[in-house]
Image (spheres, rainbow, N blue to C red):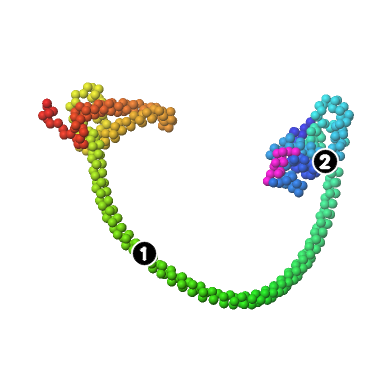
Amino acid sequence: MLGNNEKIQGVNTPELFAAMLSELPWRALNQYITGNAQLLKVCTFGGHRVDPNQRPRLEKQVINEAVKTEYSEATCNALFAAWYPVHAELHEKLETYFKSDEYKAYRTENKLSDENYILCTEKFDEFFSANELKAWKILLVFSPLKFTHEQADQILNHQASSPELLEQIASLEARLDAATKKAAAASADVEKARAAQQATENELRECKQQLRNAKSELDSVNQKLQSSSAETKRLSSLLATRSEELTKQAANANENAERTLNRLQAETARLKDELNAWQNKYQEQLLANRQIQNDAANTDTRAEKANAERDAAKAKLAESQKFVDLLLSRIEWAKLGSMLKLSPSLRKNFNSMLKRLNYEEDLSLTIEGTLTQFWGRLQKTETELIQKVANSNTLEVANGDMEGFWNEIKDSFTEVQTSLEARVFMLGFINELLFSIYAPEQLANAIIPPPASKKKSAE
């Protein structure tokens, strides 16, 4: 048995689906589209409506959706349910049989379930008709009926072996040829009538155009004549009015000129008095400005003197602030290290401090920059080490070499320890230098105390 969900060889499913769709009445097609929410959304996209005039577009949309679902059973069954009642005679035969007692007995005899619909050979031969061959192909592909292989072969190959169908095709072709000839003759007659009608319409259109042109010219001439008459009357009236206005304007102009002359003479006298008053004020302001300039010059002189005193005080203050740096720069560190009797621990710290010094051109050891800058360089390695340890999780990944990163950290610990030892020694040394070697009155001066004499050193 073949079910409608099985792949049947030699069947063009898209063609039968399109044929089933085209046979639907508009009411059935409308119900099929509006009953499917997804299909309705596609068909109305862009503001379109489900309208009989748009049936070709709607059928195309339905076919496209069926292609997307690869002609799924759900899509085809819904369309078949709308198409099946269209073939009323075939629908009546099949439904009457499947609801009859005869089919119930057949189903019981062959132990068929209520969902199985099968036509025995006798009933198939009784119901099958070559005139409804396309309908039987649709039943074979889309209906829930199950056909035998012989029945399916008869439906698919009946066209090639049916003399009745061939005779019908020949008759239809003959009728088509006759209709084609009549249509060609009718088209020729229509074309001739259309040409004659076109010539008549062109001639009529030309006459109407000439009539419109003549009427337009006549209207234009009449309008110009009326406009000329009205313009002549208007100009005459305007001329009389303008003469009266000019006479009045001349009298008014004489009166206005006399009044203006009197006003200007009075204004001139007032302005002369005002000018004399302003000249007196100018002389007084000129004397006041000279006094202001003298006061400003004296103020500038005092300001320059105050600025000079301020610069001198700043220079003296800067000099006093550099006392410790100047003091440390005068120390001969190498000679001091050899003269000091240091314990092993202090000597190690002293040597660590010397490693932080820079050689100048004369190979003498000095502290580079100020004491604050020197101290900041010693502290820099400590800060960098703490930052690396605190952010080690991130820096390990960024570095890409965990072992190399921690080896660098290990070396940094040694450098920081040396820096700390140097700073410990430096603090003790500065304390001893400032509070044991020099007296408080010497440290109060803004100059470096002179070195002790050899005699005092010996004592």
The image shows residue 279 at horizontal and vertical percentages of 34, 64
Q: Nearer the viewer, mark 1 or mark 2?
A: 1
Query: Is 239 located above or below residue 189 in the figure?
Result: below
In the rendered structure, the answer to whether residue 454 lies left or right of residue 113 reads left
Name the quadrant containing residue 73. top right
Question: Which residue is label 1 attached to?
Answer: 277
Q: Amino acid at mark 2?
A: Val
Residues 376 and 334: in front is 376
The image shows residue 358 at horizontal and vertical percentages of 25, 34
Residue at the image point whose x is 75% and y is 69% from the top: 208
In the rendered structure, the answer to whether residue 407 lies left or right of residue 298 reads right
The image shows residue 21 at horizontal and vertical percentages of 77, 42
Does residue 400 appear anywhere in the picture? no
Residue furthest to the left: 455
Res 86 label:
2
Callout 1 touching callout 2 (CB < 8 Å): no
The image shows residue 255 at horizontal and vertical percentages of 51, 74
Badge 2: how crowded within 10 Å, few (<14), some, or many (20+)? Answer: some
Instruction: Tell me if residue 213 is in the magenta stretch.
Output: no
Residue at the image point whose x is 70% and y is 41% from the top: 41
Query: Is 321 located above or below residue 346 in the figure?
Result: below
| Range of residues picked out in magenta | 35-46
Name the quadrant containing residue 378. top left
**SS at mark 1 in the image:** helix
